Image (cartoon, coloured by chain):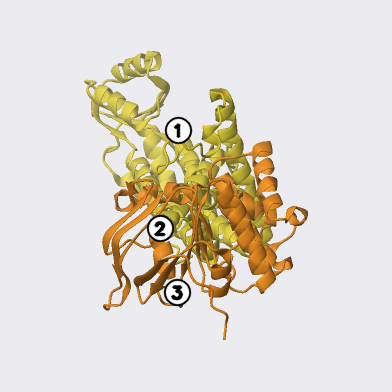
Chain colours: A yellow, B orange
Amino acid sequence: MSILFTGRATGAAAKKIGLLRRFIMFWLNHARQAVASLGELWRTPSASILTIAVLGVSLTLPATLHLLVKNMQQISSSFTQAAEISLYIREQTPANQVQSLVTILQADRDVAQVIFVSKQQAMAEFQQISGFGAALNYLDSNPLPDLIRVLPKNTAPQAAETLLKRLSAERVVEFAKLDIDWLTRLNAIVSMLQQAVAIIALLLLSAVLLIVGNTIRLSIMNKKDEIEVMKLVGATDAFIQRPFLYTGVWFGIFGGLLAFLVVELMLWWLQSAISNVTALYQSDFSLKAMSFVEFLTLLLIAVLLGLAGSYLSVRRHISAIEPTGP
Amino acid sequence: MLQFDQVSKSYPGGFVALDRISFRLEKGEMAFLTGHSGAGKSTLLKLISLIERPSAGRVLINDIELSRIKRSQIPYVRRDVGIIFQNHRLLMNHTVFDNVALPLVIEGFTGKEMVKRVHAALDKVGLLDKVRCLPATLSGGEQQRVGIARAVVNKPPLLLADEPTGNLDPDLSKDTMRVFEAFNQVGVSVLVATHDLGLVARMKYRTLTLKQGRMINDGLLQYQEPV
């Protein structure tokens, strides 16, 4: 395209080439520039490795925290299995009515298991555990109520709550209690951790953005003369900034890969220590590693940050460089 | 082709670099721009290549006023004007081929067409055997010719040169001027800024002489034997 001379054939666009060929050439050009940027990184290995290392470490932390939260959730979800409803039976309820309630509950579709604890059993247990022992014998009557322990089939807090409401409506039930408080507390802690992780991740990711931006700025400054010459022979800003954008993308890719490797190494390192601990607790807990989707997400985030960082830098600094004279 | 209409350029601080300059360079014409250093030669060339904008007056190329060119369009204007710099301004860590190919790469040329054009341009300046060399391994005159090849590789209709013989010996200067003449003969308009008055006078081309920002002569320069 020539602005001054209409009809002057300029550039490759002036040659008649097919749409398909032009499309292929477009991608070929981009691929070539991407490889050229990679070569540029290769030629300054120490500086590139330093930058990539910083990016890798900055990305490792959010990735690790994410895995921590993921494993925490795994633990807390295994705890929800323990949700249990206790039904305290009214005093002086005839034993046969209690028995029939137990039978009804056993047939209930929402109930997984029913355990009946009579007041005598409860007293015996209490005597044994509390240590009051003989002192309890002085009581006139047994103050403890009969108890039915119900394990719901659906152990999610919401469903258990609904079942609780339904069961407390039973005539012989004095009141029903769901031991769910500690569960909501655990969930609250997990979600608080999640938010803390999100904030830390945000900070570290913006650090990545700034690091890439600054590195690109330095390399623009290093190539000031070259950029001036390119501008003098008619290069557009878009043409000049492309290699720098590709450099940002490469930083992202290598930083992301490094972070992945560090995380894997850390997991491998911790695996034996954690299995020792879980063996002591007789738990079948196993550390969850990064899934393939998570790996891709990490890489994508790294690449996007690299691109965004270099874009911010390129926008500001390339248009600021103007040739000063022939 | 190139027209200056009452063009003035003053810099902040009141320094007047150009004072109401008017001239016309026709299509296919070759002219010299002379004057002592500081007379305004470089400023005049900067106005054409849109490195600077005039304070007053109009600069037109092919009847299009350069003040109407937007910032984003400047690169496209520069592709129509080949510029040769006094200090070559080559990319020192790239080969001669890469340097000459730069304007073509910018315009999107690839493959055989690009190689063909680069070789043709280097052939014209007699440097075809140095294609793979780095500029640092070439002599000053050869570097200057690489600069010329880069300026003409995309066949611009207008060629500007700023002191192209600045640090060349007389023989090389003459050769360089011959190269410009050759381009002029195929229809390119050429404007060469130089302070080598002897050379200018011998070449018998139209000469524009600047003195303290004013045009004091437009026409053939009488040859004076150096005293």
Chain ID, mark 2:
B
Residue B196 in view here: no
Provide the residue designation for mark 2. B48
- Tell me the CA gap for discs 3 and 1: 94 Å
Q: In the image, which is nearer the foreground, mark 3 or mark 1?
A: 3
Q: Which mark is residue A240?
A: none
Residue A174 picture location, percent across and down = 23, 29
For badge 2, the amino acid type reads: Ile
Mark 3 is surrounded, within 10 Å at the Cα level, by few (under 14), some (14 to 19) or many (20 or more) other residues, namely many
Where does residue B94 sit, x and y in percent of width and height? 66, 58
In depth, the one of B6 and A278 nearer the eye is B6
Q: Is residue A35 left or right of residue B31?
A: right
Tell me if residue A290 comes above or below residue B46 in the rendering. Answer: above
Q: Residue furthest bottom?
A: B227
Disc 2 packing (10 Å; few <14; some 14–19; many ≥20)? many
Q: Mark 1 and mark 2, same subunit?
A: no
Residue that label 3 marks: B35
Q: Are marks 1 and 2 in contact (CB under 8 Å)?
A: no
Task: Measure the alpha-carbon separation of dots 1 and 2.
Answer: 81 Å
Residue with the mark numbered 1: A81
| Circles 2 and 3 on the same chain | yes
Query: Dots 2 and 3: beta carbons under 8 Å?
Result: no
Which amino acid, by three-letter code, is at mark 1?
Gln
Earlier sequence position, callout 2 versus callout 3: 3
From this view, report whether residue A192 is shown above or below residue A43: above
User: In the image, what residue occupies the spot 55% across and 43% down?
Assistant: A299
Q: On what subunit does the disc labeled 3 rest?
A: B
Residue A15: x, y in percent?
56, 31
Secondary structure at badge 2 equals: helix
On the rendered image, what quadrant is the C terminus of chain B found in?
A: bottom right
